[in-house]
Image: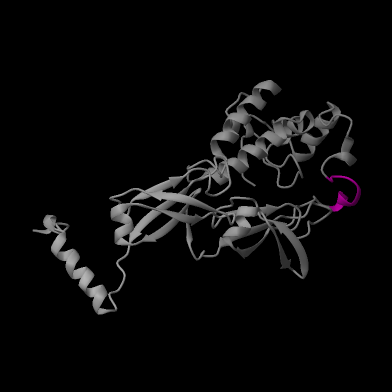
Amino acid sequence: MEYVDFYEVLGVSRDAAADEIKKKYRQLARKYHPDVSREPDAEERFKQINEAYDVLKDPEKRSAYDQLGANWKHGQDFNAPPGFDFGDGGSFGDIFETLFSQGGFGNQGFEGFGGFGGQQRGGFARKGGDLQTSVRVDLMQVMRGDEVNLTVNSKNLNVKIPKGVKDGQKIRLAGQGQAGAGGGPNGDLLIEVSINKHPIYSIDRNNLILELAIAPWEAALGTKVNVPMPEGKKIQLTIPAGSQSGKKMRIPKKGMPGNPVGDLHVILKVEAPQAETDEQREYYEKMSELFEFNGRDKLA
């Protein structure tokens, strides 16, 4: 197991006080939260930051980590932290003898630390492997934060979909993976979320996009149009006179849930109705006489 320096992850010194560690954790958690960060490795950094803080905020865990390094929790495949020296002729057993003789594990003793005692006398406890699966959900399920049912290894699980989860993002369910060995904890279940295509909305980060078709006379003269909102209601949107295809109109706070909440962007699309009768064709001919169209000037 590769040694990860939790102090380096949080950017604090090894003798940092609890208040300093807490302050630094909050700063980094806000910066790398997957819902707001645009960093490519935000999800992994956020996971490391939380893991580091979980250990360093707890005096007993911190003490064990300072002495055992990467495998402070289970003790397998010991990797010493930087600066830890076996000494001349020292051995793995010497380290434990030194730690226990110096009270390195507090009052827990050999039986209380990470499963070294009891049933673990013949070997070290190991965490079970992680399992991976996927789930397809509709956009509205993501908007509401619905629960979905999954069957993994013949086990039924009710999984709550976090509001505003991104397409391709993974949900971690602790303890729902493979069983641990030697009394070790179970692994985790990683669920990759795929969002089905919606009939009218598309997703752009935290924003929703809606293409709104309008007639040429609506674009030219202006009009009011009822636009459906994701929660099911409709609002009246005023289309300004002289609008063109591609014009974007923003409706704040009507996009994906999250921090911050996204917006709904309505993109106008001018569509000319098909002339199906003689009268309709005459109207188009009259328009061609009344209006000068110079939209292709730039192609000359």
The residue positioned 70% from the left and 23% from the top of the image is: 18
Task: Name the side, left or right, on which 3 lies relative to 289.
Answer: right
From the top left corner, tell me how far across and down residue 83 is, in percent. Answer: 63, 29
Of all residues, the one furthest to the left in this rendering is 300
- Above or below, comparing residue 14 to residue 112 in the picture: above
Question: Count of labels shown?
Answer: 0
> Looking at the image, can residue 89 be seen?
no
- Residue pictured at 55% horizontal, 38% vertical: 32
What x and y, as percent, mark residue 15?
66, 21
**Left or right of 161 on screen, residue 269:** left
Residue nearest the viewer, comparing 265 with 203: 265
Give 94 or 118, whichever is nearer the viewer. Answer: 118
The residue at 67%/27% (across/down) is: 22
Q: x and y percent of residue 52 in the render? A: 66, 36
Q: In the displayed image of the protein, which residue is found farthest to the front?
A: 279
The one of 285 and 65 positioned closer to us in this rendering: 285
Question: Is 72 covered by the magenta stretch?
Answer: no
Give the magenta-colored segment's residue range: 115-122
Residue 66, image quadrant: top right
Considering depth in this image, is 203 or 286 the residue closer to the camera?
A: 286
Overall secondary structure of the magenta section: helix
Q: Quadrant of the C terminus?
A: bottom left
